[in-house]
Image (cartoon, rainbow, N blue to C red):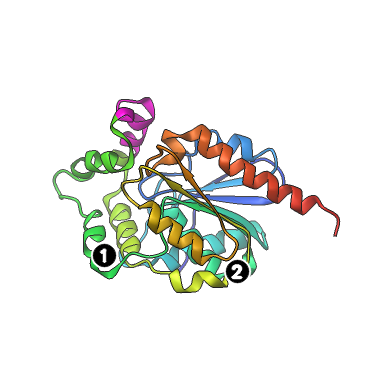
Amino acid sequence: MPVRLFHSSTGKGPPLVLLHPVGLDHSFWGPLIEKASAIHTVIAVDLAGHGHSDAAEYGRAIAAYADDIRALLDELGLARSALLGLSFGGMIAQEFAATHPERLSFIVVGACGARIPPEARAAVRARGETDPVTGMTGVAEVTLERWFTPGFMASESVRRVRERLLADETAGWAAGWDAIAGFDVHDRLGSINAPALVIAGERDAGTSVAATREMADAIRGAEFSVLSGAPHMMQIEHADRFTDRVMRFLRERHADASQPR
């Protein structure tokens, strides 16, 4: 059953839904929302079990999170939308594109692959496990070290991410990682006909460039970019370069849509 999602909306134009990584919320997009809202109605959501949205039950698959997005589009009266998702959000975006292609105008994904190999699933699921005593405190630092480069760890941006992680409900964190562990949409990506941009971070310790490239290769006509020096949380540590690359793609789509038919 779909979960009701908190969302914020700004701008005018065709809708663009933003799907955040596990553990974060709708507010971690740097300058992207402001810039994209010049040509899009930007809808930034809190995924189930995150932020102000309803809780997520453990055991729900990535497909259930994608169904949440379809239900949100229905609630907003939107026949179609573009999706931009990173990491956990990128997996949800891929699932949505493969399952609800008639609801998708185009897709931007990054910091993820198209599947978690069976041999890696237990380790990925374990990232969602927390100690009943220490809670999120026990997993926050190792998560930050996987998400950012050492030279960025003392930044104000990482301090804010740390605060978000420490405030997370452990149930939503566990449910998200369990969903990630079972993710596999690779064999269905060839059915996506919408324009696509796939972005990898050169220094992503969570998802290799090779895994992200494999996903891009499976989507017909997808553009593929690697952000040099960027870690898993590229939209935070390399916010301006990430935003510039996304905006180039968005403006190209906007120009295409403006051409007379």
In-front residue for pair 199/122: 199
- Which residue does the numbered mark 1 point to in the structure image? 121
Choose top left, top right, bottom left or bottom right for residue 133: top left
The residue at 39%/52% (across/down) is: 209
Q: 153 left or right of 52?
A: left
Do callouts 1 and 2 mark residues in contact (Cβ within 8 Å)?
no
Q: Earlier in the sequence, mark 1 or mark 2?
A: 2
How many numbered callouts? 2
Residue 3 seen in the figure: no
Q: Secondary structure at mark 2?
A: helix
Helix, strand or loop: magenta stretch: helix
**Figure quadrant of the C terminus:** bottom right
Relative image position of residue 38 (x, y in whole percent) = 69, 38
Amino acid at dot 1: Arg
Q: 73 left or right of 2?
A: right
- Which residue does the numbered mark 2 point to in the structure image? 101
Residue 213 seen in the figure: yes
Relative image position of residue 207 (x, y in whole percent) = 35, 52
Q: Secondary structure at mark 1?
A: helix
Q: Is residue 19 above or below residue 220?
A: above
Amino acid at dot 2: Pro
In the rendered structure, which segment of residues is drawn in magenta? 151-164
Q: 165 left or right of 188?
A: left
- Label 1 Cα crowd, 10 Å radius (few <14 / some 14-19 / many 20+): some
The residue at 72%/47% (across/down) is: 13
Gap between marks 1 and 2, in whole Å? 27 Å
In-front residue for pair 226/259: 226
